[in-house]
Structure formats: C-alpha cells, structure tokens
Amino acid sequence: MKSVHRYLLGLIALLFAFLFVSYVVNENENYFKSLIYRHEDEGAAMYVALAIVATVVAPLSALPFLPLVSLLYGWFWAAIFSIIGWSVGAWIAFVIARRWGKDIVKNFVSLSAIERLEARIPTEHLFWHIVLLRVLVPVDALSYAIGIFTNVKVRTYMAATVVGITPFAFVWAYVGSLSWEYLLALAGGVCAAYAVYFALRRSR
C-alpha cells in the first residue's frame, strides 16, 4: 500500500511539473521555436544527456522537460530521444552496480530503495519480469537493483529495458504534446482518483 501511495504522489507531482512546463512553453512557443531553429542538433543532444544523467542520479528526472521537447521536435522524436537517454543511463547504472556494488551505488541512489526492490526481483523468467518492472519502478533504482541482486546478462537486461520503457516513453511524450489545459484536467483527475483511494483506505 505504501508503494501505491508513493507512486500516486509521485505521479501527481510529475503531472503538475508537466503542467508548469507546458504552460511556460505554450506562452513562449515562438521564442523556443526560433531558439531551437538555430541549435536543433545541440538541443536534442542536451535532452538525451539530461535523460542519461537523470537516470543515473536519483532523484533527478528528465520527464518534466518532455512538453518542451515534444513541442520542438514532435512527440514521436521526443519519445525516441527519451528511449535513447533512458537506455544509456540504465546501462550505466547497471554496470556501476554490477562492477562496484553498494559502496558506489549509495552515491547515486538511496540504498533503502534498492533493498526494497530485492524482494520484487525473481530468479526465473527475468526478461519479462524486467519488462513489467520497468512500467512500475523508476529506471534508476531498478537498474541498480538488477545489477546488484541478479546474474542476468547485459544483453538480456538491455533488451528487456528497451521493450519495457518504449511504451512508457511514447505515452509520456504524447502527454507532453498536449496543451496545458488538457494537462490541468488530467492532473485534476489524478488528484481526484488519489483522494478516492486515500478515503477508501482510511475507511477500512
């Protein structure tokens, strides 16, 4: 239950960050488009680099910047850039965990978060379990946990990672392309759902 509670709160915070960035982007659309026209390749590279760093170092996140990237490059390319950045970051986090263990990992992410994930990682059918976990768990913490607590091969881990994050990337990139009014309505809906969930939980 606590994990669901944290997930919903995180989703609400993320939606409001989306909302703020979307509002700023929509109010300054011409400025951002003229800016990126002169620095198109550099802008894409900067977002991919940010996604890599945010994946390796918790609790940073590149997601709030997706409304800007979706506006400038379109939601399809925003998703592709996210997949590249998150995949490279997940590979780096995995290698750090596999080679140096908890002594180094603790500098990038909370060890308690890693240890809570240990019980969720099975010893069999790792490919499909990793795919499923990618939908439910932040990329950074899961990457470190898998690197520490499993013997999965890098190729299997990376294939499962790409499969797992691809739908997530496209959904969030598309959400990032929506107007801030739609995002406001979506954030309100999530808040209402959380209020109902919290009220039902307290009534038990």
Image: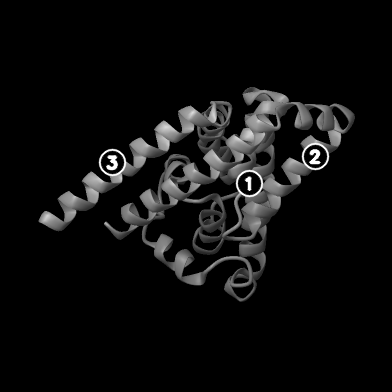
Between residues 150 and 91, which one lies in front from this camera angle?
91
In the rendered image, which residue does mark 3 sit on?
193
Q: Nearer the viewer, mark 2 or mark 3?
A: 3
Count neighbours of disc 2 (C-alpha within 10 A) and say few if under 14, some if 14 to 19, many if 20 or more. few
Three-letter residue code for mark 1: Ala
Residue 144 figure quarter? bottom right
Q: Are marks 2 and 3 in contact (CB under 8 Å)?
A: no
In the rendered image, which residue does mark 2 sit on?
45
Between residues 23 and 108, which one lies in front from this camera angle?
23
Compared to residue 62, the image places residue 83 above or below, namely above
At horizontal 54% and vertical 38% (from top left) the residue drawn is: 165
Q: For the image shown, how many numbered marks are present on the structure?
A: 3
For marks 1 and 2, give the CA distance.
13 Å
Three-letter residue code for mark 2: Ala
Compared to residue 85, the image places residue 182 above or below, namely above
Q: Earlier in the sequence, mark 2 or mark 3?
A: 2
